[in-house]
Image: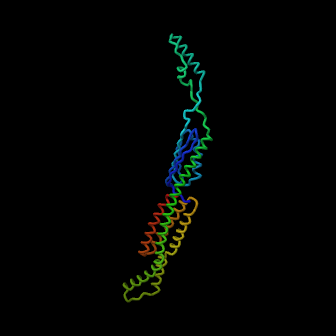
Amino acid sequence: MMKSMTGFGRANEGNENFAFTVEMKGVNHRYLDLNIRMPRSILSLEDKVRKVLQEKLNRGKIDVFITEDNYNSNAGIPMLNEALARNYITSLNKLRDEFSLKDDISVSLVAKFPEVITLKQEEKDIDEIWYILKTTLECAVNNFLSMREKEGQKLKDDILVKIKSIEGSLAKIEPLSSLTVENYKIRLQDRVTELLGDVELEPSRIAQEIAIFADRACIDEEIVRLKSHIHQVKDTLELKEAVGRKLDFIIQEMNRETNTISSKANNIEITNLTIAIKNDIEKIREQVQNLE
């Protein structure tokens, strides 16, 4: 299904020890640009996170925010440095005897000295962390893609409306193109009569002039190519893959053919119709910029 590059997704998963929240937001971009923000404690998993995202996303500037709630943030193992404690006590006893000080050495006093008791953090189970994080990430990506698909369907419907409008204008141009040469023939003969009066000009010379104009003003090929591009747009919209770049190229070709029709036709009605077509093409181009 066609997807927009604009979207938002959020998910929260966890267990009794910790939980992760993943939020994603995306806007249009020519390529896939991932910006991942995550806690320093799990930076080692960034490559895995990036790989999961790259497997599911093709284009867009994606900001990913990962936060962690640790329900055992104070958990750890107290470690006693016995040698250091013994040295502290020895020093305190020496200080007491040397200066005849009151003996108030206690456990609480010694425990306050630096590095006597340290808290060793328990090693995290990285596999467990990745399992929870990956589950959360995939859920957020699915929500993100679901929103993209809904937006993509709206863009598709809007593009098809514009395509139908272009087809309507093109249907009006076709009969006018055949009249362009005949109108030129009449105008040319009238102009010759106006300038030369009763002097007759060889019919072959007029026919040659009309043939040159007909060849220069013929827009049949451009109409056929424009119709072909319209069918390509419709077919591309039905593809189950990223279509943004392909559509962007087709729209450029449609605009090129329309400009050629406008410049060659030498007909005010055709010119006005090509202006309407170019207006619709520009609106489609703006929509295509938001497609993955």
Compared with residue 159, is residue 129 higher up or lower down, i.e. above or below?
Answer: above
Question: In this rendering, does residue 292 appear at all?
Answer: no
Compared with residue 249, is residue 35 higher up or lower down, i.e. above or below?
Answer: above
Residue at 46% x, 69% y: name it: 277
Residue at 55% x, 37% y: name it: 71
Extreme front residue here?
16
Out of 206 and 12, give the one closest to the viewer: 12
Rendering coords of residue 30 (x, y %): 51, 55
Compared with residue 275, is residue 103 higher up or lower down, i.e. above or below?
Answer: above
Compared with residue 152, is residue 219 higher up or lower down, i.e. above or below?
Answer: below
Question: In this rendering, does residue 119 appear at all?
Answer: yes
Rendering coords of residue 206 (x, y %): 45, 84
Q: Quadrant of the N terminus?
A: bottom right
Q: How is the image coloured?
A: rainbow
Out of 235 and 245, give the one closest to the viewer: 235
- Badge count: 0
Rendering coords of residue 201 (x, y %): 42, 87
Rendering coords of residue 219 (x, y %): 49, 75
Out of 96 and 35, give the one closest to the viewer: 96
